[in-house]
Image: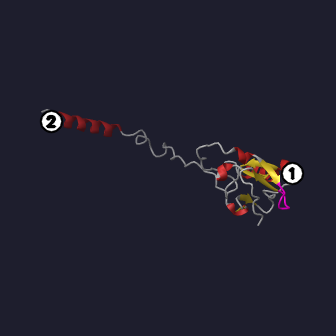
Amino acid sequence: MTERAPLASIRFLLLLLSACGSPQAATTGSDREPPPTPLATSPVPTPSAGRIVDGFWVTSDAPAPLSCVADTDCAADGTVDATGCCWSYRDMNVTAQSRAYESFIAAHRAEACAGVPCPSPPVPTQPPDCLFEVRCDASSGVGLCTNACSPMVPSTS
């Protein structure tokens, strides 16, 4: 008898569950709510409007990313990936660049990138201080923004 008690209990539970059914099963077809639609995702912008040149996302109307006349023309900021919207996280996301280019990227991101899903950033680390020490180096005859980490002037080709 003790072996039959668990079997009887299981049968009773199955009978009870099948009699109750789900709340949706009790409604008629016209009473049912439509299944939820998947959340709409923003389209990821295509890189066709711009391209990566020497690590910088540029378009035909972008200012030169490294061009400068004086130290005040340079900034230390992040770069964007091939979409033109998401941070690239290269060089720990800090690189020397012209203030004109920095403003161009900020305006582009504000105008074209709202709602664009970007990958999560890596675990944050403090970049070396020398990345934030930017200046305009005119030793090659052309003013180029550099940082104290890389004393060599970047290639202009």
Give the amino acid type for the residue marked by disc 1 in the picture.
Ala
Residue picked out by circle 1: 70
Q: Kindly tell me whether residue 88 is visible in this rendering.
A: no
Residue 102, position as x, y percentages in the image:
78, 50
Tell me the SS state at disc 1: loop
Sooner in the amino-acid sequence: mark 2 or mark 1: 2
Q: Is residue 112 left or right of residue 124?
A: right
Left or right side of 7 for 65:
right
Label placed on residue 3: 2
Q: Position of residue 65 (x, y in %)?
A: 78, 57
Callout 2 secondary element? loop
Q: Position of residue 50 (x, y in %)?
A: 73, 61
Residue closer to the observer: 120 or 35: 120
**Quarter occupied by the C terminus:** bottom right
Instruction: Categorize mark 2 by other alpha carbons within 10 Å: few (<14), some (14-19), many (20+).
Output: few
Q: Amino acid at mark 2?
A: Glu
Front residue of this view, candidates 101 and 126: 126
User: Which residue is at 80% across, 50% downward?
Assistant: 135
> What residue lies at 65% left-to-right and 53% top-to-bottom?
90
The residue segment tinted magenta is: 137-143
